[in-house]
Amino acid sequence: MSTIEERYEAYKRDGFTIFEKLFDETQMQIWREKYKELSAEHNGQTWFANTLELAPDIMWEAVANPTILEFLEKVMGPFVQLDNLTLAAFPSMEPEKAEGRVSGWHRDRWAHVPYTDEYHRPNAINAISYLQDLTDEYGPLRVIVGSHRKPITIEPDGRGIPHPDETIIHMKAGDVVVTHNGLIHSGTPNTSGQLRYFFSIYYNLTWLKHTDHHTGPHTQDLIEQAKAANNHQHMRLLGVDEQLQPRCNSGFLSSDEERWEEWANADRDAIKEA
Ligand SMILES: O=C(O)CCC(=O)C(=O)O
């Protein structure tokens, strides 16, 4: 087990960190069932965004997972909002069609191609879990370690094939990989004969726009609950950041990380117990 400091150092160096077994089988089964229900209701659709609004009772615990949020606030400061919550499943394909292919190299939403090898706070972070073990048949995750700090580009004809610098990660069911949005990564085609579930909790900085709308009645109820509890961390997740202006104009003369910790502690102390 690494300490949060060790994780943060590894994350800055590699562009990702993996929390093992963060979600348990009961939670994963509930999410898989929800996917099947949604897909049946929507003519076999395989990709669902806005899933917090679609199923708040079973999704909020993932979005507001304390272990993930503690780490995100360490990395981004207490400026973390939900950009989008996606539950998807990649259908299986014939092994001959998948041979020598990857799903598609990319950096994630709100990224840019790095100019230098300096570390920068990410604009966004993906907390991805797969609701099954990613064996070779299900299709492992591929990453180019450290590519959030390297000006690597890939020509179009290289984007669907293995990369010489890739690392292949066989994620286990319930593990959560937290990526820097500048990390180049790809899935691998699924040839298992079963669905390959993909659950992505995507967070960005509160002064950016969010991709999910957060305007639906269920999400609005969650905002009201967070306001009643004076829980700024939860309000921010849903797009309401009441401290944004002072905290984004703090003068920037003491270390960012010290200020972030101070603000996160102040938010915790401000929560009203129910
Ligand atoms: O399929 C995977 O393992 C990764 C998918 C992914 O990174 C994405 O859709 O952004």
Image (cartoon, rainbow, N blue to C red):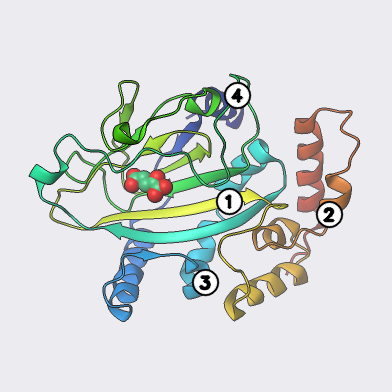
Separation of residues labelled 3 and 1 (CA atoms): 17 Å
Kind of residue indicated by mark 4: Tyr
- Whichever of labels 3 and 1 marks the residue nearer the N terminus, that label is 3
Please give the residue where the numbered disc 4 appears in the rendered image.
115
Residue 240 placed where, x, y %? 74, 63
Give the foreground label among 4 and 3: 4
**Seen in the image, is 152 located left or right of residue 77?**
left
**Residue 56: image tag:** 3
Crowding at dot 2, Cα within 10 Å, few <14 / some 14-19 / many 20+, comes out as: some
Query: Which one is earlier in the sequence, the residue at label 2 or at label 1?
Result: 1
Please name the residue that numbered disc 2 is placed on: 243
Q: CA distance from mark 2 to mark 1?
A: 18 Å
- Spatial CA span between label 3 and label 2: 25 Å
Name the element at disc 1. strand
Q: Amino acid at mark 2?
A: Gln
Mark pair 2, 4: CA separation:
31 Å
Q: Is residue 136 left or right of residue 80?
A: left
Say what secondary structure mark 2 lies in.
Answer: loop
